[in-house]
Amino acid sequence: MTEDSTPQVGVGPWTGPWPVSEHFDPELLAEGDRRNVVDRYRYWKLDAIVADLDSTRHEFHVGVENWQHDLNIGSVVRTANAFNAAAVHIVGRRRWNRRGAMVTDRYQHIIHHPSIDDLLQWCTDNSVPLIGIDNFPDSVPLETYDLPRRSLLLFGQEGPGLSEEAHQASTAVLSIAQYGSTRSMNAAAAAAITMHSWIRRHVYDQPVD
């Protein structure tokens, strides 16, 4: 802590002889690394971190509709980075609020699609099924659905949810079990639950009931 007791994020300048590996950033070694990264990536160059993440990325993608400049997208990107998703797909407006991402978008592949048709074409070209997440009457429970290893998990705009076009384009639409009075939960929270469900199924090999 500093003299004013303000907590310091990260680490200060490297002490002792500098490491010689090419993935270390001389500027960070000299000045310290205050980035929001796990300890194993301290002092690493940005492109070295991305390359290392690319070697272990999971096979699920995340998509978010962005027709009204949704504030949740940054949080979805941050969670996608935490679970090392293959990529995040932004559908609709190209501009989105990056504040919630906490700079994690630098380490995450972001793909823009101007329309649902364009997203669906990408899914077809890459043999990735499109899985919508919303609580429609024809939705099936996420808790009992066997998520495909290769899949794109699509979330709608905060408020209206998935557009009808996205609903119709999805191979399946899944709902998350809720037990309170609200009709729906925050889109970023739904995305986190769904991504973790994929992790439990395909990283920890936990079968669905």
Image: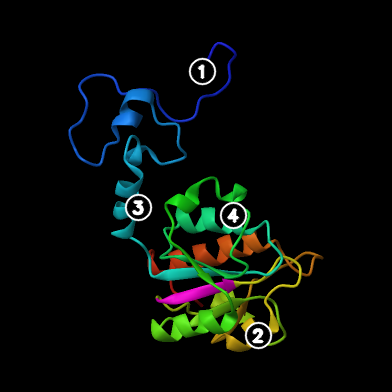
- Residue positioned most to the right: 181
The residue to which callout 2 is attached is 165
Q: Is residue 43 above or below residue 80?
A: above
* Mark carried by residue 1: 1
Q: Residue at position x 70%, y 61% from top?
A: 186
Whether residues under marks 3 and 4 lie with C-beta atoms below 8 angstroms apart, the answer is no
Q: Amino acid at mark 3?
A: Val
Separation of marks 3 and 2 at Cα, in angstroms: 33 Å
Q: CA distance from mark 2 to mark 1?
A: 52 Å
The mark found on residue 50 in the picture is 3
Provide the residue span drawn in magenta: 150-154
Q: Is residue 99 left or right of residue 122?
A: right
Position of residue 132 measured from the top left corner of the image (x, y, whole percent): 59, 78
* Residue that protrudes farthest toward the left in the picture: 20
The amino acid type of the residue labelled 4 equals Gly
* Quarter of the view holding residue 65: bottom right
Q: Earlier in the sequence, mark 4 or mark 2?
A: 4
Q: Indicate which label's residue lies in the foreground, 1 or 4.
A: 4
